[in-house]
Image (tube, helix red, strand yellow):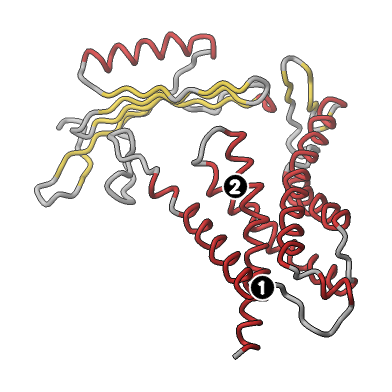
Amino acid sequence: MVEPMRRVAKLGIWIGALLLGALVPASLAAALAHTVTVLPVAFVITLGHATILGLPALLIYRAARWTRLSAAIAGGLIIGMIPGGLLFWPVRLSLRSTASVDGIPTLINGTPTAAGWFQYVELLGTLGGYGALGAFVFWLALRLSGALKKAERGSSQPDLGSHGAGIWLAGVTIAASLAVAAIPIITKDRSCHSPFRDGPTSLIPKMQVNLDIEMGEWPKLTRVLEDFAASHGMSFRNSNQSDPNVLESLDLSLCNEQGLLITANDHRWATQGYAPDHGGLESSRESLRSDGGRQLATPES
């Protein structure tokens, strides 16, 4: 009976440390973004790093008996940088694209400038920092639970700390992970601004207009749509975002409970020279069926 409990405690410690090492950097990313809705996505990314790259690294560390904090942080730093470094590799020779930030060129004909390389290194530092934080939390959980003592002593006798500590760590981190997974359900938009509020039913736009306007005219468009919503008894939502040197986002929505939804969207990234993303004004309309479902209404209705 003691041996099965010991195995459960051992497994609990490692599972708990793994989940905790993914939860903490994901929580930091959500805090810096000032929105909890980022947390589930960030957790999926950090957990993916921890399992796909972290577990193989863990096997290597365990075989070599590398238990020092410095080794853990170095490994986490590398693991954090590799996927993002490959995904955001700045050289785009095949696209021959050009980009700038605040008038400073970062990409010319697909080749990064000095400013572009600096931007890339800065990104790697951020991603590596998240990886190092996750590795530190993982190492700390194992250290406090006593799971590292066996490797340090080279003893064949298991020394896993308290059985209860392992089960408690696994239970708490699994519960926290489930809570993070429930965030999209809890924060789901159930207002008329969401075309998916009654289930996975996508609304097909009945009208789409490409607006050829500059970012300087976005405030005027916002006022026009806000006045239109007020005069027609519609709900108006302004979700525009401005992140200097990163993103300028136009995100407006007007709707009513009868199913009319009007949106205006455009997202312009600094890395792309604030070029339009071909967003526009869309209008969809749906009507309620007698059976409680929803169907698209024709423009004439």
Q: Residue 121 or 178: which is nearer the viewer?
A: 178
Q: Is residue 90 visible?
A: yes
State the residue at coordinates (68%, 56%): 21
Residue 4: x and y in percent read 61, 87
Q: Quick one: SS at disc 2?
A: helix
Q: Is residue 281 visible?
A: no
Residue at the spot of label 1? 162
Residue 237: x and y in percent read 36, 24
State the residue at coordinates (75%, 68%): 146
Q: Is residue 194 above or below residue 83?
A: above
Residue at the spot of label 2? 42
**Which residue sits furthest left?**
290
State the residue at coordinates (31%, 29%): 283
Viewed as shown, does residue 137 lie left or right of 37?
right
CA neighbours of label 1 inside 10 A, class few (<14), some (14 to 19), many (20+): some
The residue type indicated by label 2 comes to Ala
Q: Mark 1 and 2 residues: CB-CB less than 8 Å, in contact?
A: no
Residue 167: x and y in percent read 58, 71
